[in-house]
Image (cartoon, helix red, strand yellow):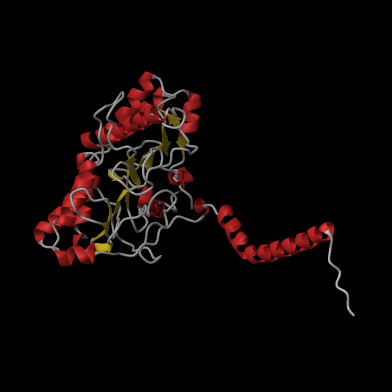
Amino acid sequence: MLRLRTPGARGSSIWAMRRALSARNILALCMLPLLGALAALQRADPLDEPFKGVTTDGTVRTGLFPIRSTGVSTKPVREAAQKFLAALTAEQRGKTTYPVDDSEWRKWNNIHRYARQGVSFKEMSDEQKSRAYELLGAALSVRGLEKSRNIMRLNEHLAELTKRFDEYGEGLYHLTVMGEPSDTQPWGWQLDGHHLILNYFVLRDQVVMTPAFMGSEPIHAESGKYAGTTVLQDEQNKGLALMQGLTAEQQKKARLQPEKTANNALAQAFRDNLVLDYAGIQGRDLTAPQRQLLLDVIAEYVGNMAPGHARVRMDEVRKHVEDTYFAWIGGADADAVFYYRIHSPVILIEFDHQTPVALDGPRAPGRRHIHTVVRTPNGNDYGKDLLRQHYEAHKTDKAHGHPM
């Protein structure tokens, strides 16, 4: 008769351990492909990918952004940049200036915990701050400057609410200058901080001010140093007015999802080569009054630039208005939480009600936290297509100083 040996306590523990190890090994083997993929993602740096720009299918549509004269002077911006740089110490200038084609352009990020380059307002003397604001004032409209300042102020209010002054504050915005301010050569500047990023490229009298990110949490200060400050309500309300101005059938065509349950913005930091197909309702399917509502929404964003260059940009937008798409996620009642996107060959705009990050509340999208981003698709974010054409035109000119 075969006797089965019943293991004692020690034997049982060894058997159990073997079973556990065996199961663990099987799990580990199953996880290897996933772990490998995750490791590859962690190693991948989006800046290692050559810049292409936002496209609908991975192919850049060419010929949209010719080098030309706009008739709008960039002298005030150039002189303001020169005065700002002159006000810095040699050490500050050393960490603030970069070549015009440097990858520093692409290193912006709208999150608060991020290592930024350049000199911050917190580090600046009063005179340097004054020069920095003069630079912003020369490049932006009155409304654009006030909106930017209010975002910075609300970041200070967020520090008051959270008591995290090392992470939030109106001084934690950094300026860098790319290239040397010039009336003939390409150059530009960047403002980088939490919820506020402006990229401003200049080639003679042409300007490209994208990517441009504006947001805030909260969007209104009910107390503190900047009580009463509010931002991004026109972007919210004009977008909603456009959606409400559509017929039921048109709304159905524009709406991608009936409910907004998550963050939907796609074109934020490190998405320079985003592939995003058109979606929603097309401009050619709108009535003339509806099309004007669409242009009014776009003008709210473009109007952050100084008036002359904003007019140039809107002329560019109008040429493609029939091929401009409007897409929506969420409801359209008076207090709705939503996302919208405006997308054409020459402009991409996103508005997104976001989930809370720094403030308490349900982990669902709401009106207290807003992100907006503006892009120039088809390769001209950061003025890259203009810069490419400039280099190409002077590639045989050794005296011009550009790469061959």
- Of the pair 227 and 364, the residue shown nearer to us: 364
From the image, which quarter does the N terminus lie in? Answer: bottom right
The image quarter in which residue 122 lies: top left
Measuring 34% from the left and 32% from the top, which residue is drawn there? 152
Provide residue 391's location: percent of width, then percent of height.
41, 51
Provide residue 330's location: percent of width, then percent of height.
27, 57
Residue farthest bottom in this picture: 1
Q: Is residue 378 left or right of residue 248?
A: right
Q: Is residue 86 left or right of residue 319?
A: right
- Of the pair 304 and 265, the residue shown nearer to us: 265
Provide residue 221's location: percent of width, then percent of height.
28, 31
Residue farthest front in this picture: 1
Please tell me whether residue 263 is drawn above or below residue 175 in the rendered image: below
Please tell me whether residue 226 is drawn above or below residue 202 in the rendered image: above
The image quarter in which residue 131 lies: top left
Q: Is residue 263 left or right of residue 28?
A: left
Residue farthest top in this picture: 126
Provide residue 216's location: percent of width, then percent of height.
33, 39
